[in-house]
Image (tube, rainbow, N blue to C red):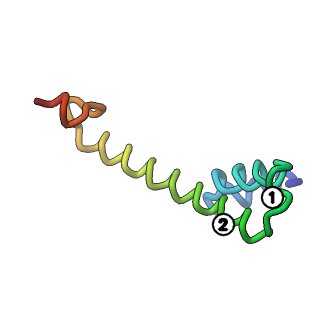
Amino acid sequence: MLNSEGHQKIKDLRLTVFAEKFLELTNDEANDKLLPEQVFMQAVHHSLDSRRSNKVDKLIKQARFPLPGASIAELH
């Protein structure tokens, strides 16, 4: 597992979400039959989805919409 120095390097690279998901996937016995590349790419996809979601949330907040969580139907 990672030591505190390794955790700091991951944090400096802004890979915290990736590292957490990667460790979760590698510790899950259900993934034992997957290739290392497949586990790695699952963690990459999760990390990218998380970044996109955070970016959208940030943009919505910056736009200062009056009802930021409303759907189109609720706006009518």
Image quarter hosting the C terminus: top left
Q: Find residue 41 and name its label.
A: 2
Residue in the picture at 67% in, 55% down: 11
- Secondary structure under the numbered disc 2 in the rendered image: helix
Residue 42 picture location, percent across and down: 65, 60
Image quarter hosting the N terminus: bottom right
In the orientation shown, which residue stands out farthest toward the left? 76
Q: Find residue 47 and name its label.
A: none
Vertical side of 7 occupied by 65: above or below = above
Residue in the picture at 23% in, 29% down: 67
Vertical side of 37 occupied by 58: above or below = above
Quadrant of the image occupied by residue 61: top left
Residue 57 picture location, percent across and down: 38, 43
Q: Nearer the viewer, residue 68 or 12?
A: 68
Question: Quick one: label 2, few (<14), some, or many (20+) residues within 10 Å?
Answer: few
Vertical side of 76 occupied by 26: above or below = below
Question: Quick one: label 1, few (<14), some, or many (20+) residues within 10 Å?
Answer: few
Q: Nearer the viewer, residue 27 or 55?
A: 27
Q: Find residue 6 and name its label.
A: 1
Report the Cα–Cα distance between label 1 and label 2: 20 Å
Task: Give the side of residue 53 with respect to residue 75, left or right.
Answer: right
- Viewer-nearest of labels 1 and 2? 2
Residue in the picture at 63% in, 51% down: 17
Q: Nearer the viewer, residue 18 or 40?
A: 40
Quadrant of the image occupied by residue 72: top left
- Secondary structure under the numbered disc 1 in the rendered image: helix
Check if mark 1's residue and mark 2's residue have beta carbons within 8 Å.
no
Q: Nearer the viewer, residue 23 or 29?
A: 29
**First in sequence: mark 1 or mark 2?**
1
Q: Amino acid at mark 2?
A: Met
Residue 49 picture location, percent across and down: 51, 55
